[in-house]
Amino acid sequence: MDIIFDILHIVAEKEKIIPTHLLYKSNLSYKRLQSYLNELRDKGFLTEQEPEKKNDKKFFVLSEKGYQFLQRYRELKDLTVAFGI
């Protein structure tokens, strides 16, 4: 859960991010990051945007569901801290 939160948080901070930058910031191996990205795309937390121009790169953006997850996860973290868990 923490890794998923971290990935979504990184994307939310940048608003959109290319895969290479996400790889560096997440500090995960390429294979592991791809696995998480596939899962997050399939579940609707992230969307992958194709380049508008030929030389541009594809990038990821957070969906509304992704923003909702971040909010709820933060609330859960706050609750666990409040109860000393």
Image (spheres, helix red, strand yellow):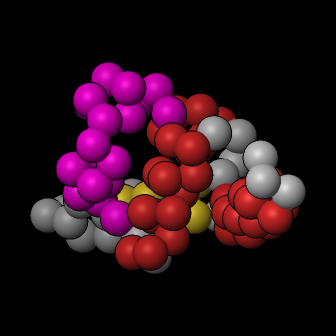
Closer-to-camera residue (6/34): 6
In the displayed structure, 49 sits above or below 85; it is below
Closer-to-camera residue (74/15): 74
Residue at position x 65%, y 52% in the image? 45
Closer-to-camera residue (48/80): 80
Q: Position of residue 55 (x, y in %)?
A: 14, 64
What is the count of numbered marks? 0
Residue at position x 26%, y 29% in the image? 29
Residue at position x 71%, y 40% in the image? 43
Quarter assignment of residue 58: bottom left
Quarter assignment of residue 4: top right
Does 34 lie within the magenta span?
Answer: yes
Identify the magenta region: 17-36
Residue at position x 39%, y 75% in the image? 14
Does 12 lie within the magenta span?
Answer: no
Q: Position of residue 83 (x, y in %)?
A: 85, 57
Q: Is residue 19 left or right of residue 43?
A: left
Whether residue 69 appears in this view of the structure is no
Q: Position of residue 62 (x, y in %)?
A: 57, 64
